[in-house]
Image (cartoon, rainbow, N blue to C red):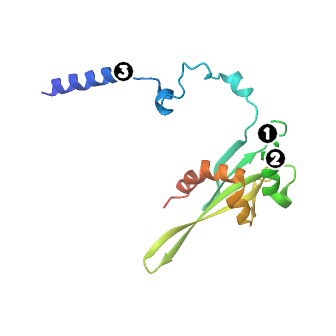
Amino acid sequence: MFKVLKIAILGGILVAGANAEDFLAKVTAGALSDISSNVKKLDATGMNEVKGGLEFKGPWNFSYNESGAYAKYEPGKDGDYIKMQIQQGLGAYNLPGYYLAYTVKREIKSSRYGRYPLFTYSAAAYNENTGEFHKISSSFVLNNNAVVRQLRDNFKRRMESDLGGW
């Protein structure tokens, strides 16, 4: 009985492998495929030649209950819109060596129902020379800045998890 089960499982794996399709085609519902003429697989030199895009750094814990990540702007590679968003977000911290960042802070609060974690999110200016995060107390930047939104979308769950989660 056990031998028959092993053979059945092995046969199922082999059939699934034989019928496996292009993963990219599956994910994009057939819109793209690995063998499409407009899909190019990049090697290491090709990756270095890619122009534009922010370089995201982090996340890492800079205290026992706070974590942060920042976006590094590369002059000449990124577009004017990204540059404007970073300048607008940094405000008074728009100085060399400062980058727009996103931070998450976890605090333990208590109520009559027990203890619970409270996460606080903020935009910040990261000083690469000193390694310090300076809070930017603007809800407009936190909620509406495209660069901060990208940082939030990429790192929020990971930072919450690194700090102990819910």
Crowding at mark 2 (Cα within 10 Å: few <14, some 14-19, many 20+): some
Rounded to the nearest whole Å, what is the CA distance between mark 2 and mark 3? Answer: 47 Å
Who's the residue at 64% across and 23% down the image? 42
- Tell me how many marks there are: 3
Please report whichever mark, 2 or 3, sits nearer to the chain's N-terminal start: 3
Q: In which quarter of the image is the N terminus?
A: top left
Q: Please name the amino acid that badge 1 sits on.
A: Asp
SS for callout 1: loop
* Picture layout, residue 54 above or below residue 43: below
Crowding at mark 3 (Cα within 10 Å: few <14, some 14-19, many 20+): few
Disc on res. 83: 2
Please report whichever mark, 3 or 1, sits nearer to the chain's N-terminal start: 3
Q: In which quarter of the image is residue 12?
A: top left
The residue indicated by pointer 3 is 19
Crowding at mark 1 (Cα within 10 Å: few <14, some 14-19, many 20+): some
Image coordinates for residue 155, horizontal then vertical, percent: 60, 50
